[in-house]
Image (cartoon, helix red, strand yellow):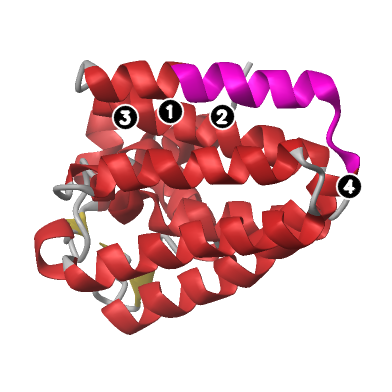
Amino acid sequence: MRRPAEIAYEFMKERILEGIYHPSQKLIENDLAVEIGVSRNTVKKALLKLEQENLVVLENNKGATIKSFSLDEISNYLKIREVLEGLIAADAAQNITDEAIEQLEMILSEMKHHLQTMQFDAYSQGNLRFHDVIYRASNNQQAVDMVRIIKQQLKRVQFKTILVPGRNENSFEEHYAILEALRSRDPGLAEIQLKKHVANVRHTIINHYNVLM
């Protein structure tokens, strides 16, 4: 059975990552306690954990605020992710199995269907699954762990990029190029294609920051 602090933490974290709670929004402990059905002290414990994950900011006498990332912070996170994802892809290319390649092919086929039917949420979920297969194929789990942290920080912003005109088609083409590099078991090409993909995500966010935020 989950403890109240875990319930409160997961409740708030989900709403932060899904964008229900907005960047710079104040979180009122009493209101949260009533909404979640826990004590105010339990809410405090959950907020401390969210602060450790850089999702909220806690200030004395000011309470909790949803973390808001500047454009420079987002760009820097994605530059770091670009390097790490390249390392992961290069390693995965040398270790990926035929079964994993088949999984990527199936996911990409589903993603194509989701684009054609304008199911963008489903496309984004497929995107996550696609990358997860690559992460599992890599032996560089330290890099994978760091990438997962960065992706969690930027989830609110990155999921919206698919709504930018033209980005969905470009995203699909980039994923197809990644698959082809992995299928050829070419570490250098896999690294290039994955880094190109993340760089394009970064450029999309920079060029449409005001709309996405």
Circle 2: element type: helix
Give the crowd class for mark 1: few <14, some 14-19, many >=20 residues within 10 Å.
few
* Among numbered discs 4 and 3, the one appearing first in the sequence: 3
Q: Is residue 20 above or below residue 187?
A: above
* Residue assigned mark 4: 94
Residue 129, disc? 2
Q: Residue at x 44, y 16 (%)?
A: 110
Q: Are marks 1 and 2 in contact (CB under 8 Å)?
A: yes
Residue 36, disc? 3
Residue 169 location (% of width, % of height): 29, 40
The quadrant the N terminus occupies is top right
Q: Is residue 130 above or below residue 150?
A: above
* Among numbered discs 1 and 4, the one appearing first in the sequence: 4
Q: Nearer the viewer, residue 69 or 16?
A: 69
How far is the residue under mark 4 from the one under mark 3?
A: 47 Å
Q: Residue at x 51, y 35 (%)?
A: 128
Type of the residue with mark 2: Arg
